[in-house]
Amino acid sequence: MNKIVAGIDGSQAALAVCAAAAWASQQLQTPVLALHVLDKSEFPTERDLSGNLGLGAQEHLLEELAALDSQRSKLALQQGKLQLKAAREQLESDEAFAVETLQRHGSLTDTIQELEEDTRLVIVGRKGETHANDLHTVGSHLENVIRVARKPLLVTVHEFRKPRNFMLAFDNSKTAKAALTRVAESPLLKGLPCHLVMVGDDTSERRSQLEAAQQELENAGFSVTGIVQPGESVATVLVNYARDKQVDLTVMGTHGHSRIRKFFVGSNTSELLRQTDTATLVLR
């Protein structure tokens, strides 16, 4: 059975990730894998210190530095285990379908790619431990995950509550149509009212495109409010609409995996993630 992979660290974002994972687990009837990755760039398993002190360095100083590195890594490993234990307890308290834990030493993106075949949904926080006080910061780990993840990605903000509704950003592109079809076919958002939003001038062509998209969602059982919203910045228009209508979850399609596109995050997706106050579901 596919799993929901929930990225856990020592930041406040972990609480929101657990809450989102428990909700998604119930909706999809899918187990949660709470994942903690000890970043190899911060806590290398081995480090060559021989050149750090210059010629004539005393051997015992190198040994002490190596011992300190080893102790730091062990402490980080133990801290991660405690974080996973707390995550399991939180997920079980929130009645997740089932819970597993996994700790890895490596990189978050590599680990997510390794687990991808058995993954149904990835959940991460918008910011990590290094950006704990920056409410609208997109962490570097998240940007990397967006670049490589092929599975749906749910990005939480400072807190998460069970969505009462959602907004689907639609521009009639191939990507947006694919995202709309995935929403219509998935049980994740079933039963939730949908705000279907196109950004731009209110033309007859856009109205026709919007109506066709709205009909597809209604045929799948969704209650849909369709609207063409004027504005120049797609991200700003969507964020303002979500705040005005008290939207709990934003859904967007993003770019595919061509050799060029994989090196950057789509501008609208990236900017929305920086501005928004709601959780965002990013679909390939």
Image (spheres, rainbow, N blue to C red):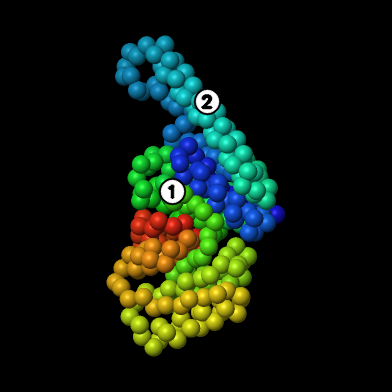
- Residue 158: image tag: 1
The kind of residue on which mark 2 rests is Lys
Position of residue 150 measured from the top left corner of the image (x, y, whole percent): 53, 59
* Residue 143, above or below 183: above
* Residue 124, above or below 200: above
Q: Of all residues shown, which one is farthest toward the right?
A: 1
Q: In which quadrant is the N terminus drawn?
A: bottom right
Q: Of all residues shown, which one is farthest toward the bottom?
A: 204
- For the point 32% across and 76% down, the residue is 230
- For the point 64% across and 55% down, the residue is 26
Seen in the image, is 268 located left or right of residue 176?
left
Front one among 84 and 147? 84
Seen in the image, is 240 located left or right of residue 93?
left
Element at label 2:
helix
Identify the residue position indicated by label 2 in the image: 74
Report if residue 65 is visible in the image: yes
- For the point 36% across and 48% down, the residue is 135
The crowd level at tag 2 (other Cα within 10 Å; few <14, some 14-19, many 20+) is: some
Res 52 quadrant in image: top left
